[in-house]
Amino acid sequence: MRHIDPGLQYIQPNGELTAEGRVVWEEIDPQLRLDFYRWMVKVRLFDRRSIVLQRQGRIGTYAPLEGQEAAQVGSALALTTLDWIFPSYREHGVAMIAGMPLDRILLYWMGRVEGNLAPEGVRLLPPAVPIATQLPHATGAAWAAKLKQEPSVSVAYFGDGATSEGDFHEALNFAGVFNLPVIFFCQNNHYAISVPFSRQSATLTVAEKAAAYAMDGIRVDGNDVLAVYDVMAQAVQRARNGGGPTLIEAVTYRRGAHTTADDPSRYRDEQEAQEWIKYRDPLDRYRKLLHAEGMLSEAEERLWEETCKQELEEAVRAAESAPAPPASHLFAHVFEELTVSQRRQLEELNRGEGNDKDE
Amino acid sequence: MAVISYIDAVTQALREEMQRDEKVFILGEDVGVRGGVFQVTKGLIDEFGEARVLDTPLTESAIAGVAIGASVYGMRPVAEIQFADFIMPAVNQIVSEAAKMRYRSNGQWHCPLVIRAPYGGGVNGALYHSQSVEAMFNSVPGLKIVAPSTPYDVKGLLKAAIRDEDPVLFFEHKRCYRLIKGEVPEDDYTLPIGKADVKREGTDVTVISYGLTLHFALQAAEQLEQEGISVHVLDLRTLLPLDKEAIVEAAVKTGKVLVIHEDNKTGGVGGEVSAIIAEEALFDLDAPIQRLCGPDVPAMPYSPPLEKEFMLDVNKVKEAIRDLAHF
């Protein structure tokens, strides 16, 4: 098996805690320990169900996240409703924990208009697709928090590919200069579509780039939910207390395809993927730990999986029964008030002529 | 009413808006201690402090991106791009994010931000301190673009831009900064974005322009009056959205239209203005629509004779108006 330096690790792949991990584990509320497990299961089942829905033509192209559950669940559970989340397009797990209902997330992948609407009070932006554009936004929200003197922290979620973009540098540099309460959370899943991390960067890690911005850079085992949570919780606390930004690199692996329109067998060694699935799975190791700690039985596992599946089916039903948007919605939310030209185009559309002739 | 310069109108609008609303803050390169390379923000750091007049790193994409993030959080950032030429690294943020935030979030989040940038030549600024970039953004729904030509319009429109709930690009012609003076009320007022303004009434030829070249048109009109040519001058003021009604009305008024801008001809705002007239008022025209614009060369030369060649001036405008009057 290939050696991977996983970074900070508390739960070993065999499910055993490290000595340091044991100390952290004892401090974690038992309810939170169970929440780690429950969310990871729910996220994985959602992901698998979504792929099936895509194959059945019931949702559009979908970006799978299997393998990255611990990175998303561990980090998102360390946040509060005060905090701002600027995600990329693979962060459905984060979105769920932030408070996005499952049916809304499905609606997004159906291309329905409601899919990006976070419930009232949830500071979650729609997924950023252009790559790394959300990083300066997180920096900007952190600057706003400073101006408003509010104790909120901003988090930008992104992948290893985004670290090659100019916006990565500009956002981290700005955050470093002004010591802003922002966390840059990179899920290094080793591939940006087909391009491996070695083609994104000459450095071996993402975390070491933090040195260039005089901020803490932490490489953590992204498949270890406990370590991710702990690292994130510390970064949040540091940011809230005026300690400035942190770059976190969660080392993980995208088990599946980039999206359902991609085929990883064209560029990736299947054996490599199998190693991650068999030996470094985030859920397996956590399940083993809970079993060893006497916190989870097989019956409870089955019960929780059933509960999740039921919830998922209800979400699918809700999403599929959502009414189609009216054609006029094409012009909704362009501006606070439409321009004269846009109003005319909308009237044209409402008359059912359906072209974009502007008069 | 006090007579002030174009640049002082910018400063006045910024100061008054920052006094009025503590959510308004400025960010950009050299805007703080230096007061801006043109002194637009002079004195503001003393009045409002360095957090609200933020000297940023050299980082145009982040200047725009930070403004977006802060505006989503409820602030009203006014970002300065030091020269419009340097807006290019921020295009992704402006076009892909600011212009689409309201739309892609179904109205949940929006970006009430202003990006100010001095543009235009005639100041020996050479290739990278003279460009007009407005046309590059003029086909982006979700943006508003304002390019005023007088101090009165500057103050009223900048205030309106800052109070607007959507992103506004505010282009200031840098040659106008100290050249153009005019009466500006000391009171608070705004002007509507999206409304053009008739700057001179006339009956023979209609000139449609904005920015510095608008003043060439006004001077030309003044001089041509002695030759018996009556020129109607429309100042677009807002380039996106264009004021179609005013454009058509101005075109119909004389039946002869000259569109002038410093930005290069191909793909410029003048093409859209001409198309509007062609669509809506073709049979009211007595001559083909004419455009007098900057040449289609990559940049404003540093060489003084070549820069002069690139720039429009009163004589070039007069000649074009005369040609059209005699058509």
Image (cartoon, rainbow, N blue to C red):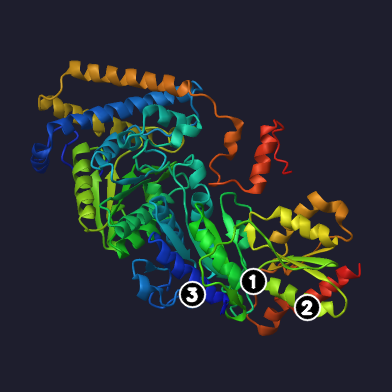
Judging by the rendered image, the residue that carries numbered circle 2 is B222
| Mark found first going from the N terminus, 1 or 2 | 2
Residue B87: x, y in percent? 52, 64
Residue A246: x, y in percent? 26, 54
Mark 2 element type: helix
Residue A80: x, y in percent? 25, 42
Judging by the rendered image, the residue that carries numbered circle 3 is B40
Mark 1 element type: loop
Residue B168, can we see it?
Answer: yes
Q: Is disc 3 on the same chain as disc 2?
A: yes
Q: Which chain letter matches label 1? A: B
* Three-letter residue code for mark 3: Val
Q: Is residue A218 left or right of residue B294?
A: left
Quarter-of-image position of residue A10: top left
Quarter-of-image position of residue B199: bottom right
Eyeballing the image, is A323 above or below B7?
above
* Three-letter residue code for mark 2: Glu
* Three-letter residue code for mark 1: Ala
What residue occupies the far bottom of the structure in this picture? B304
Tell me which residue sits at (40%, 53%) in the image.
B69
Q: Is residue A241 left or right of residue A167?
A: left
Observer-nearest of B168 and B16: B16
| Mark found first going from the N terminus, 1 or 3 | 3
Judging by the rendered image, the residue that carries numbered circle 1 is B299
| Mark found first going from the N terminus, 2 or 3 | 3
Q: CA distance from mark 2 to mark 3?
A: 31 Å
Eyeballing the image, is A205 above or below A297?
below
- Quadrant holding the C terminus of chain B: bottom right
Residue B174, can we see it?
Answer: no
Mark 1 Cα shell of 10 Å, populated few (<14), some (14-19), many (≥20): some
